[in-house]
Image: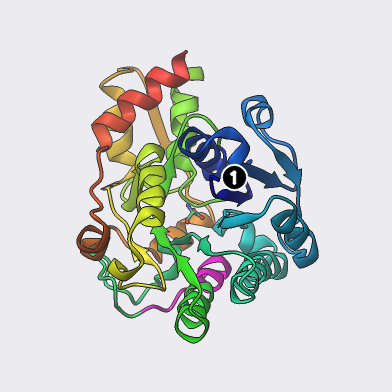
């Protein structure tokens, strides 16, 4: 029998594409999508779906038992910009959802967990360029504090209880199928929509804010390769640095201008500038390459080309 997989937060930016990729790999009926709201027609029609609140342990346990779930991908979270507005709600969602799945694994009700961390675990005192896997981490955002705490708990559950939990620190993710919501790196998706609809964009980050970014196909491939890796090959049980490209809003705009010459960008930094200033400009992901063969395929040029081509259609 195929192993059964549950994705919690399946209707979000990552969850939507991850669900479809896992359905393609393991068969539609083996991959149960869940979220607190319904998702795209494609996702809803292609396989099982459950309305599920990630903070409700019993509800998750019921779904796990009903579908005989072996692996859980916990993609539900409140992102950095929204979390600054609702700190306690963010803490509650981001931490309790994680404890729920860690405890299900501790009780041997599931075998394996994927939980995403983020570049937000780093802080203003972290080395900014080629940020090492192991370094000073003093996150200064609510979201970053929750992800940093989550990493500590993942490693703890692995060491104390043998829980097979795997994680990557995603950079900002760029995709055309589902929009992100409430993040600081969202400008890098919005800009493509506005470039096509209005030929102009006002960036909420200034022109020289360099951040680590990744095209969604690379992020999905990284996630699935890490979950496929041999247990014994994994030396990191907090979360792996994961890199692909780094650019500023000005560099991204210049790349878009290669395709849309009259595209214009303006800058009006808001509260998200301070969040971005506390994050790395680039990360050293050598551990991910060594342990499970990570290598990105999309650079800025290729990402710009696929984004514009797909959004035009
Ligand atoms: N992309 C996320 C955010 O901006 C970071 O993980 O909040």
- Furthest toward the bottom, the residue is 160
How far across and how far down the image is residue 257, in percent? Answer: 30, 23
Q: Which residue is mark 1?
A: 181
Left or right position of 44 against 157: right
Q: Is residue 139 magenta?
A: yes
Q: Residue at x 63, y 41 (%)?
A: 11
- Furthest toward the top, the residue is 313
- Furthest toward the front, the residue is 1
Q: Is residue 118 magenta?
A: no
Instruction: State the image quarter where residue 97 is shown.
Output: bottom right
Left or right position of 304 against 99: left
Crowding near the residue tagged with mark 1, few <14, some 14–19, many ≥20 C-alpha atoms within 10 Å:
some
284 relative to 22, above or below: below
19 relative to 122, above or below: above
How far across and how far down the image is residue 137, in percent? Answer: 38, 78
Instruction: State the image quarter where residue 55 is shown.
Output: bottom right
Of residues 190 and 311, the one nearer the viewer is 311
Q: Residue at x 58, y 69 (%)?
A: 142
Report the span colored magenta: 137-147
Q: Secondary structure under badge 1? A: loop
How far across and how far down the image is residue 149, in percent? Answer: 53, 77
Of the 4 image quadrants, the one containing the N terminus is top right
Left or right position of 113 against 248: right
């Amino acid at each position: 029998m195929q192993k059964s997989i549950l994705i919690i937060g399946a209707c979000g930016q990552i969850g939507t594409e991850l669900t479809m990729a896992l359905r393609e790999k393991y068969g539609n009926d083996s991959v149960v999508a869940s979220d607190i709201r319904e998702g795209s027609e494609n996702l809803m029609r292609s396989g099982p779906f459950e309305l599920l609140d990630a903070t409700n342990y019993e509800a998750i346990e019921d779904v796990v038992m009903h579908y005989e779930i072996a692996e859980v991908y916990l993609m539900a979270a409140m992102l950095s910009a929204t979390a600054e507005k609702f700190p306690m709600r963010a803490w509650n969602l981001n931490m309790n959802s994680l404890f729920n799945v860690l405890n299900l694994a501790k009780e041997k009700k599931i075998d394996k967990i994927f939980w995403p961390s983020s570049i937000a675990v780093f802080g203003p005192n972290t080395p900014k360029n080629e940020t090492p896997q192991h370094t000073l981490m003093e996150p200064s955002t609510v979201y970053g504090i929750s992800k940093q705490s989550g990493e500590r708990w993942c490693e703890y559950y692995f060491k104390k209880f043998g829980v097979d939990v795997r994680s990557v620190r995603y950079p900002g993710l760029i995709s055309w199928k589902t929009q992100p919501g409430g993040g600081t790196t969202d400008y890098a998706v919005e800009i493509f929509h506005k470039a096509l609809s209005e030929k102009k964009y006002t960036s909420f980050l200034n022109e020289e804010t360099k951040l680590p970014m990744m095209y969604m196909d690379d992020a999905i491939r990284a996630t699935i390769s890490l979950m496929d890796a041999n247990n014994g090959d994994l030396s990191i049980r907090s979360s792996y640095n994961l890199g692909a490209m780094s650019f500023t809003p000005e560099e991204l705009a210049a790349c878009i201008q290669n395709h849309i010459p009259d595209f214009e960008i303006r800058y009006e930094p808001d509260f998200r500038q301070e969040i971005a200033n506390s994050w790395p400009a680039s990360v050293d992901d050598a551990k991910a390459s060594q342990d499970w063969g990570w290598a990105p395929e999309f650079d800025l040029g290729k990402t710009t080309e696929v984004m514009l081509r797909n959004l035009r259609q």
